[in-house]
Amino acid sequence: MTSESRSAIILLSGGLDSMVSAAIAAEQGYRLIALTIDYNQRHKVELQSAARIAARLDVAEHIILPLDLSRFGGSALTDDIDVPKTGVGDDIPVTYVPARNLIFLSLTLGLAEARDARDIFIGVNALDYSGYPDCRPEFIQGFERLADLATKAGDQGSGFRIRTPLQDMTKADIAKEAIRLGLDPAWSWSCYDPVDGELACGLCDSCRLRQKGFAEAGITDPTPYAIP
């Protein structure tokens, strides 16, 4: 069976990485089914970006699933905790959402089995990122093994593949890949702490990593920043 006859589930946050990951899946000939999680995150503006990207990529189905992780809290993205603005450090930052990618991939896996899809695309990378443990290759490999143990499809020998096309890319590489794929970076949103819901703060880890990547790639970042 070729990729042209298969569906792929895309975990689409609305950020640059998930946009590029989705476009790579489309380039490989997959029929795209996108899942976006509305987890009551501080930066809900990214949901608008996800919808915009899904429309631009002409996905076959786009599900925006509500899941209120603010009930758990424990993160600056879901709780009354200030988003750090002092720069990217070496420790896991408070913007880490407890077990987020594990939760999201579990939901994506359920959708994949329900839609008879065997390929799941997620835009994690382990080079220019904030040090989240659920972006590491070891986590992805472990989840892929777990997926086969946890599902009827896996039990019957029809396992799942977690595709991470950006795993070894820098943010500059990802910015260049967006342009190569004909994507407009303005469709995506990265900021964790938007100003008035319209401007990227320019100081959070995600803004800094995005700005650094575009600068290193020599590409203009069209994001409207409150502090450029």
Image: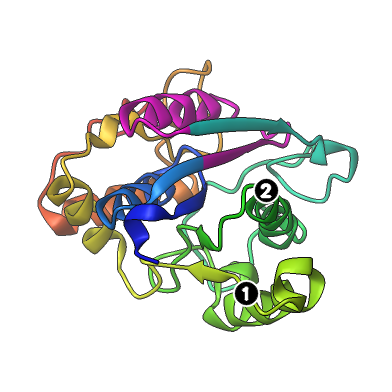
User: In this picture, is 191 found above or below 74?
Assistant: above
Task: In this rendered view, identify the residue nearer to me: 41 or 86.
Answer: 41
Which numbered marker is on residue 159? 1
Residue matched to label 2: 111
Q: How many marks?
A: 2
Horizontal and vertical percent position of residue 162: 53, 69
Q: Quadrant of residue 100?
A: bottom right
**204 part of magenta stretch:** no
Helix, strand or loop for disc 2:
helix
Horizontal and vertical percent position of residue 161: 53, 71
Horizontal and vertical percent position of residue 93: 63, 61
Q: Visible in this render: residue 154? A: yes
**Residue at 15% in and 46% down:** 179
Q: Quadrant of residue 32?
A: top left
Task: In this rendered view, identify the residue nearer to me: 151 or 192.
Answer: 151
The amino acid on which the numbered mark 2 sits, given as a three-letter code, is Leu
Quadrant where the image shows the N terminus: bottom left
Q: Residue reaching furthest right? A: 71
Badge 1: few (under 14), some or many (20 or more) residues near its Cα, within 10 Å? Answer: some
Task: In this rendered view, identify the residue nearer to me: 211 or 169.
Answer: 169
Helix, strand or loop for disc 1:
loop
Q: Visible in this render: residue 209? A: no
The amino acid on which the numbered mark 1 sits, given as a three-letter code, is Gly
Q: Residue reaching furthest front? A: 1
User: In this picture, is 8 found above or below 55?
Assistant: below
Quadrant where the image shows the C terminus: top left
